[in-house]
Each structure stands twice: as C-alpha cells, then as structure tokens.
C-alpha cells in the first residue's frame, strides 16, 4: 500500500482552493477573496488514513489551455509530476462555470475528486444536487465542502486517499465529451498525423493533443515542426470556420459547455426562482458608476483614520518601553567605561530597531483592515469598479489587483503581476507599483504626520499622501503606455465572488504573517543597517585638539560663578555643540554634507540625506536612522521623543516634502531587484530606480519652493 500520496489541488480563482489548502495543511498562506492571489505552486503536508500526503496548491486557473502563466504552471505540474490524485475545487453556487476546468481534467485522464465548495452558499441560493447522478456523469467522487468553516475536510481527504490508492469506483464510467460531427471529423484527421509524427509521444494522448492544437494552444503549437500536421491544422481551422461560422477554439468551448449544461439539467435543481441576492443588492450600491469610487475612497479614509486613532495608545506604550530600556542601560552603565559600546547598544540597536518596532501597531491595524476588505469580497469589487479607469490609462483591469496588494508590500505586488497575460501590461504595472504606498512607507508617515500636524489633520494628511501616489501611478502608467509600451490593452474578465463573512482565523493569520515579516526585517536587515549607520555616525572620532577644546570649555563652565541651573544649561550647550561637531566629522556627516547642496532645494539637510541613503535598503530604515542621527546630536540621554526633535528642527512643509520624496523616489533595493527578475532584464529595474528618483526630486523641489513662496507650512 502506498504510504506517500501526492494530492494536487486545482480550481478556478475564487473557488476557495487556497482556503481549503490552509485547512488541510495548517499553512499560513495569503488567502485573498479575488482571482490571481496564487501564482506559484505551494506545498503542505498532512497525515491521513495511514498515508503521508504531500498537498500541492496549484495556481488558480479557468482552463488548461496555456493562455496564461497560471494555466501553464498548473498543466505542466499535472502532466510532468503525475500526482496520485487531483482534487478539483469548484464553487458550487456557480457550478456550470466551474465545471469547465473539471471537463478538461477528465479529458486529460487524471485521477479526479470533485470538491463542491461553498455548498452552504449554494443551498442558500436554492440549489439541490443529485450527487450520485453527477458522479456518474463525470466519473469522479464528489464531496460537498465549506472551506471557510472547515466542513467536509475529513470526507475530502478520505476520498482523495481512496482514489489515489484504488482509482474511481468500478460503476463510474469514464466520461468523454463528444464534440459535434464537424469537429470530431477534424480530430480524427489530426490525431493519426500527430501519432505518426511522434509528437509528444509518451507524454500526451494523440486525441488530447489534437484538441489542444485545434484550440491554438501556444505551448504545443510552437513545438510542432511537422509540416504535415501544420498543414492539416490550417485546413481543419478553415473547414470548421466555414461549416460552423466560428473558430475552432470557440466551437470546442461551446461543446464542452453543452456537455456541462446537459449534466446540470439532469442532476441540478433550483428550488427558488432567479432573484436579486444580497450580493446583488449590495453591488448595486458599491459598484455604482457614480457612487462606487467615492465609497471606495471613503472606506480607505476610514481605514487610515482607524489606523492612527486606535494605534496611538499602543505606539506610546512601545515608545515608553524602549525609552525606559535605553535610559535604564545608561543609568546602570559604569561611568567612563566602554562608552562606545554603550552608544552602540542605546543609540544603534535600541534606538534604531526600537524606532521601527514602535510602528508595529499601525502596520498590524492597516493589514487587518485590508484583510477584512479582501475576505469579504469587497476588494474584487474595487478591481471591477476601477476597470474603466484602468482602461483609460491603457491597463488591464487586473492591474488593479497588484496595486491593491502594493498597499501591503511592493515585492509581492510585483509578483502578482504574473496574473496579467500581456507583457506590456505586466511591465507597465511593475514600473509604477512603487508609487503605491506600501506598509514600509507607512512607518515614515506615522513618524512625520503626528510630528507636524494636529490630530484633526492626521488622517486627512495620510489620505492625501496615499491619493497622491495613486494619481502619480495612474499618470505614470498612461505615459508608459503612450511611449515605451504602445499597444491595445486586453479586455477585463473577472468573476465577482459572493460577499462572505471573513473568519477570525483567516484575518488574524493574514495580519500576523505580514506583521511578522515586518518584525523579522526589523530584527535582521534593519538591525544590521542600524549598526552600520551607527558606525558611520560614530567614526572617526573628533581630533584630539577639538575634544580638548570642549573639555576646556566644560572646565571653564564648572568654575564660573553662576547659579546651578545656568551652569547646567551652559554645559548642555557645550555637549550639544560637541555632539554636532562629532557627527559632522563622522563618515555619515561627510556623506550628508556632500549631498546637502543637492538636498537644499527640497528643504532637506544632511541628516535627512543620511536617512534617505539607509532607506534604499529598506524604507523603515529612514525612521531608524533619523532616530540615530538625532540621538547622537543630543547629549542628554533623557531628551524628548524623536517627533519632538523633528518638530524643533524642521517645518511642517519640510515634513510634507519628506513624505512626498519617500513616496516617489528610490524604491527599496528589494523592489528594484524583483522588478529586474520579473521583467527579465536589469534595464527595467534601473529604469524604475532612475525614473522614479528623478521624478521624486523634481516634484519635491516644486512642492517645497512653491510652498515656501506662498508661506504654506514654512513656519
């Protein structure tokens, strides 16, 4: 008896496939309530009925004809890896549409189990299924499941193990789609020629190959070198077009749907008349051509408002903790002993990493809100709603989905562009995605906005900066499609899922996964960069002659005749002057000073310049580095918070310009690298880096100079 079984999960996007994968394996994979979330095969493991199951989550796909990367990845896995059983997960409330993939799996000849998922939704809509009859029609075991509630998982595993070990029941006949007379005649002409030419021998069945070639399957067509087969394909296509009045791929799809429709008429019954469902009634409002976009913008504004309002108290607690930790180390540290090590711990590690961790509540709340919007089904409506806008700028409606993911992180958003079939759409979307404010940039906004703007203006300012990014992304896409990537955009086809109540488990997993990634970055990448930037800010030390001058000044202050308070203020001023001189003498100060002439038109100084260098590694590092340079610049270990220091050093106009520049310019190194990889060339990554940095510089200079001229926020 086989103890290790490979189970492949297939299904349409939005059928609940990845939710079932998570239930079966305990995996914490991102689950989104819209098509295109899964773009690569994911694996998980489970032991059941004495067997070790390796469960593979294939990309969501509507068919096995290689029109998209998802279809190609799924088909290649089924053919090359030959899984022991394929579980096709269908949306039972939209059965005919979902059975199209099942028919193609049947034609491929894989051992099959059908999971009628969302069976609770189907029953609520009045559908009743004659499962034994449907099993005979499709030659496969059928199990009813409700993935988001975990119902039917044991029965599904039982069926998968049984089919993998012994195949379908003996009373199941192997169904075959019989195409119309015209198409069957052409299949009969092509299949023998395929076999004679030895095409795909041992890999594909000749009949299956003939059907796929008639469907103009690109991957198979480009491997056909036999002139006899090519000639027959051309003749067959002409004959089918002439006899049926439509191309072969359309006619074949029509016959498949005819087979499905006949089966459903026999075995599916609707107990209620067609009517407007709750989803339809909600959609009439949220996808309204006039009110839809304002509703979307209003929801995003509400998300940002809650992010700041609810996140403020825990942020204060974390800030107090790191302040207490740094102050405690300073209090117990032996006087005059290893001051450099003390500075490393307090200013480098605690100040750098703590300055980033303090924004974790904002990050978690934002991800929580996005998860709720995704799982309820609203994000799919947002993509549908934005389709007309996307087409006006020359992009596919699906391009909006990576942009939504970009609010979390740009890197997975770029990976999500794999759902786009057109290369021009993919490259255009990838190049403008950094203009969508990611979670890392939120740390910068969360530092700057409360530092310079009163409570009433905090949510509006965050909303404004996000909208600026969206508008710039739209304008950038329009420009790219009119210049580098000229061409027609392809039509947008997307199913809107029913509204669902998100499970607490799914929402918390999504929120925690992204939050944990943020914490890991704070504890690894940002920690390393913080230490490096601390070293740049601490070395080389002041020349002995300079240090002696400050020591002499302190001695003079100590012996001067004045009150105790006056002496403390005098010495504090000397300490601050020494710290400033030391920072200017350091490598970081020298680099920042060298950049200052270029930064001045934006209103930035050398300290902001140093932080911007660190932000290229990871945007969160900007916050950590600002904390370091300002901590070094203040001798008093019990100085006020970083926000207070920024408020004293810069104007609100400069604070706004910092957000604008960080929004637009210099995407992080990971974004540039993944753009180069996904685009197939480093020229795309460098174009993204250079183009956005230039754009950010020009726009920030304009904002600062105009604002200063008008006296807006310059005080």
Image (tube, rainbow, N blue to C red):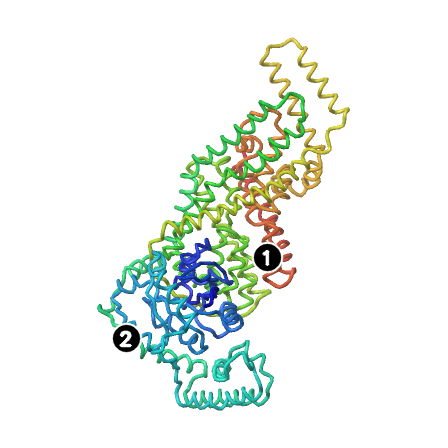
Question: Pointers 2 and 1 in contact (CB under 8 A)?
Answer: no
Disc 1 on helix, strand or loop?
helix
Task: Residue at 70%, 14% (x, y): give it.
Answer: 556
Q: Residue at x 37, y 49 (%)?
A: 504
Q: Which mark is residue 674?
A: 1
Identify which residue, 213 or 53, lies in the foreground: 53
Residue 652, given in percent of the width and then of the height, sits at: 52, 37
Q: 131 or 391: nearer the eye?
A: 131
In the displayed orientation, state which residue is furthest to the right: 545
Please tell me whether mark 2 sits on a helix, a strand or a loop: helix
Front residue of 199/543: it is 199
Q: CA distance from mark 2 to mark 1?
A: 49 Å
Using the rendered view, name the quadrant where residue 14 is placed.
bottom left
Q: Which quadrant holds the C terminus? A: top right
Mark 2 surroundings: few (<14), some (14-19) or many (≥20) residues within 10 A: some
Does 641 sit above or below residue 659?
above
Q: Residue 228 at what x, y percent from top left? A: 57, 90
Left or right: where does residue 28 sit relative to residue 702? left
Tell me if I can see residue 391 in this picture: no
Circle 2 residue? 267
Say whether residue 712 is left or right of residue 112: right
Of marks 2 and 1, the one in the foreground = 2
């Amino acid at each position: 008896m086989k103890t290790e079984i490979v189970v492949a999960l297939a299904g349409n996007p939005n059928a609940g496939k990845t939710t079932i994968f998570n239930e079966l394996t305990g995996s914490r994979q991102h689950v989104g309530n819209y098509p295109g979330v899964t773009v690569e095969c994911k694996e998980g493991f489970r032991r059941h009925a004495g067997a070790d199951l390796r469960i593979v989550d294939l990309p969501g796909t509507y068919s096995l004809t290689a029109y998209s990367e998802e279809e190609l990845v799924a088909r290649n896995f089924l053919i090359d890896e030959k899984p022991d059983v394929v579980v096709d997960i269908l949306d039972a409330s939209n059965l005919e549409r979902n059975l199209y993939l099942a028919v193609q799996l049947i034609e491929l000849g894989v051992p099959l189990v059908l999971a009628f998922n969302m069976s609770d939704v189907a029953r609520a809509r009045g559908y009743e299924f004659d499962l034994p009859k449907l099993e005979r029609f499709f030659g496969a075991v059928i199990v009813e499941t409700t993935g988001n509630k975990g119902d039917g998982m044991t029965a599904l595993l039982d069926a998968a193990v049984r089919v993998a070990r012994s195949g379908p029941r003996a009373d199941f006949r192997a169904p075959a789609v019989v195409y119309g007379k015209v198409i069957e005649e052409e299949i009969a002409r092509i299949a023998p020629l395929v076999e004679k030419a030895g095409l795909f021998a041992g890999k594909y069945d000749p009949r299956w190959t003939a059907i796929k070639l008639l469907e103009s399957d690109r991957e198979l067509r480009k491997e056909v070198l036999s002139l006899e087969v090519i000639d027959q394909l051309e003749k067959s296509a002409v004959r089918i077009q002439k006899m049926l009045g439509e191309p072969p791929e359309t006619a074949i799809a029509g016959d498949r749907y005819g087979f499905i429709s006949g089966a459903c008429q026999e075995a599916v019954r609707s107990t209620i008349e067609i009517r407007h469902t709750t989803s339809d009634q909600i959609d009439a409002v949220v996808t309204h051509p006039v009110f839809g976009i304002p509703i979307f913008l209003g929801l995003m504004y509400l998300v940002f408002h809650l992010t700041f309002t609810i996140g403020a108290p825990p942020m204060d607690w974390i800030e107090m903790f790191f302040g207490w930790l740094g102050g405690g180390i300073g209090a117990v540290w032996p006087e005059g002993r290893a001051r450099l090590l003390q500075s490393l711990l307090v200013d480098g590690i605690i100040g750098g990493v703590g300055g980033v961790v303090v924004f974790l509540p904002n990050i978690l709340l934002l991800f929580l809100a996005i998860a709720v919007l995704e799982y309820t089904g609203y994000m799919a409506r947002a993509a549908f709603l934005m389709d007309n806008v996307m087409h006006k700028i020359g992009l596919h409606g699906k391009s909006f989905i990576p942009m939504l993911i970009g609010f979390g992180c740009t890197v997975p958003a770029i990976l999500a562009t794999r759902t786009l079939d057109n290369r021009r759409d993919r490259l255009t979307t990838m190049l403008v995605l950094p203009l969508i404010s990611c979670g890392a940039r939120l740390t910068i906004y969360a530092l700057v906005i409360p530092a310079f703007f009163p409570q009433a203006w905090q949510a509006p300012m965050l909303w404004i900066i996000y909208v600026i990014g969206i508008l710039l992304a739209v304008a950038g896409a329009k420009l790219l499609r009119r210049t580098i990537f000229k061409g027609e955009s392809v039509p947008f086809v997307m199913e809107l899922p029913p509204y669902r109540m998100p499970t607490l488990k799914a929402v918390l997993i999504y929120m925690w996964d992204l939050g944990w990634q943020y914490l890991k970055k704070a504890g690894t990448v940002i920690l390393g960069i913080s230490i490096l930037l601390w070293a740049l800010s601490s070395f080389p030390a002041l020349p002995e002659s300079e240090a002696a001058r400050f020591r002499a000044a302190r001695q003079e202050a100590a012996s001067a005749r004045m009150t105790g308070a006056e002496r403390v203020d005098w010495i504090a001023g000397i300490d601050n002057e020494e710290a400033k001189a030391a920072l200017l003498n350091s490598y970081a100060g020298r680099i920042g000073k060298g950049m200052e002439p270029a930064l001045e038109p934006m209103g930035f100084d050398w300290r902001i310049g140093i932080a911007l260098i660190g932000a290229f590694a990871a945007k969160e590092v900007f916050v950590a580095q600002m904390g370091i340079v300002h901590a070094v610049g203040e001798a008093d270990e019990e100085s006020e918070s970083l926000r207070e220091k920024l408020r004293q050093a810069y104007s609100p106009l400069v604070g706004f310009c910092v957000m604008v520049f960080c929004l637009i310019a210099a995407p992080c190194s990971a974004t540039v690298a993944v753009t180069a990889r996904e685009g197939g060339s480093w020229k795309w990554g460098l174009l993204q880096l250079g183009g956005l940095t230039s754009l950010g510089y020009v726009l920030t200079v304009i904002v600062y100079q105009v604002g200063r001229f008008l006296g807006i926020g310059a005080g």
